[in-house]
Amino acid sequence: MDELVIKAKKGDKEAFTELIINMEDELYKIARTKLINDEDIFDAIQETMISAFKSLHKLKNEKYFKTWIIKILINKCNDIYKTKKATIVSLNEDIKLDETNNFSDNNLNFEFIIKCLNYDERIAITLYYLEEYTTKEISKILKTNENTIKTRIARAKVKIKNNYKGEI
Amino acid sequence: MKDNLDKKIKEAFIKKIDKPLEYENIIKNALNKEENTNKFKILKLVACFLLVTILISSVLFSKNILAFINYLLRNDSRDGIKEAIDNGYIQEVKMKYINSNGTNVKVSEILMDDYNLSIIFDIEIPEIENIEELYNINLPNLIITDDENKFIVAEFEGPEKYEKFCKENNIEKSYNNIAYSNGGYEGKIVTKYDKTIEYMYTTYSDNFPKSKKLYISFDKIILENNKTAEQTTVEGDWNLEVNLSEEIYNREKTVYRVKNCTRDDLIVTKAEVSSTAMKIEWITRWGDPVYSENDSEEEKQRKTEEFFNNTHSVRNILIQNEYVENSEGKRFYPVINSSDGNGGYNQMLNGMFRHWQTFNLTKYKATDSLKVVFEFNDEKIIIELENKK
């Protein structure tokens, strides 16, 4: 990956694009913690790519490329969310399982987790399990106190456990 | 158990999820976005086709004409609103007339909940002739915002008006809906006497916000004559402010959860009752995915085109005879509205089917237990709901 980053820093669009394709599932899931419809998610990822490619020369250490992209993406998602707040959506951002109905009984999957939690919990637990960041690293990405991150992850797990009807 | 939960959560995150076909293309073309604007538009069109959204009212699936007529007669779109009004859920507004170009306008009553907004305007037009022949009124450029600067309603009589509005308000001109109202509305002349008309404007949403104040503005009143079908336009600049009551902005919906469902793979994602209506949403599997992830791109494209060319694939999905029954045995049917999209479905290429519907059941007639009944491709499905409390 570092080699691709070095190439991308020299202006190689294909190398940069390949880096993003290698992360496409993760980026989609991270964007999905904030945005609901695919059009907004695609916009966020596209804008992230354009911004990141333009300022890639500022990235000092290639090994932090992924974290850097994720930070940009989170900011882009927040921007899009704010500008589109008035748009009608069919699912409320804070929809929680105990406010809706039986979600999948035996299917603890990504969508189930998303529906269980509020945004703060979603993004914290996604970065924790999907990217395997430490709570300290997550606190730096989200610019929040590390204890707050630990609390959000713990609370998220309790909510998932309480709402999941299958066997654990 | 803690380790198992961790493991399950981890697995949930690791597993790749279904994403639209064009996602990878969007990434590949992102850095050439400006040069490939047209390609992106085409991809967007493909994305639109990939999600088949058909807004069909349940009435299209009635089995015979008599049933259709009965269905129509017992399903007035305004039943839920009428019931709310009958139960006092309407606010009388005390305000002075706002005059512009000799025409006076004020709001006399208003009703707002998460799903419906009804405004009764009093309009005095001194120059109006033959008021008895007045058939309909239209307010083509109606803008309603609230105390948090949210757009509640944004109607434009043409693209020029829309573009001018976007420019003045620094809004991106995307032609997407910018308001909480879903664009559908109903206008009705309640009474007319002397030179005064009482006009009821109703619009719809899935989630009107809990606004405390509304700012209503419009610059045209179009009057339609019954006999001649002629239209008379009254121009002006009316700006009205309405403070909403605490009962309206502190309103609560009743949320239901599933107690039982006769179809195992059906998941209810929303079941809520407000002062004026009930909304339900559910998803289930309609069939096998149209293509497999292992298929080549050409194969996916071919299978997608084949699916869309075969219209029977779409028409074979039928939802019929929907109703909600309360524990007193009273039944409530889907709302029929002109173009408010209150009922519809998505038939998705991954084999999943999503349906949403609005019923004329309000909290005044809702009981702690409800039954939602419908036929899904001739399979009778019963969803038993209970008040979440």
Image: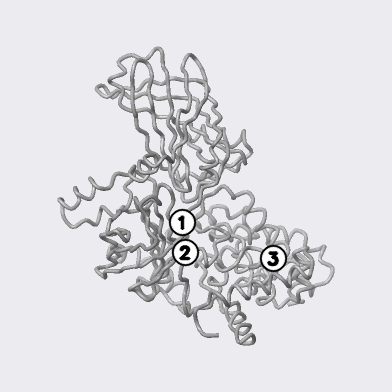
Q: For numbered disc 2, what is the local secondary structure?
A: loop
Q: Is residue A143 something one can see in this rendering?
A: yes
Mark 3 or mark 2, which is nearer to you? 2
Position of B201 with respect to B66 (left or right) is right
Tell me, yes or no, whether the two marked residues, 3 and 1, touch with CB atoms within 8 Å. no
Residue tagged 2? B388
User: Which of the two labelled residues, at mark 2 and mark 1, occupies the earlier sequence position?
Assistant: 1
Residue B261 in the image: x percent, y percent?
36, 72
Mark 1 belongs to chain: B
Q: Amino acid at mark 3?
A: Lys
Residue designated by label 3 = A13
| Residue type marked 1 | Thr
Q: Is residue B217 above or below residue B72?
A: above
Whether residue A6 is visible to the viewer of this picture, yes or no, is: no
Q: Residue beneath label 1, please?
A: B254
Distance, label 3 to label 2, CA atoms, is: 53 Å
Depth check, mark 3 against mark 1: the one in front is 1
Q: Are marks 2 and 1 in contact (CB under 8 Å)?
A: yes
Frontmost residue, B15 versus B209: B209
Is A137 situated above or below B204? below
Subunit of label 3: A
Q: Quadrant of residue A136?
A: bottom right
Q: Given the image, on which type of amino acid does mark 2 rest?
A: Lys
Q: Quadrant of residue B345?
A: bottom left
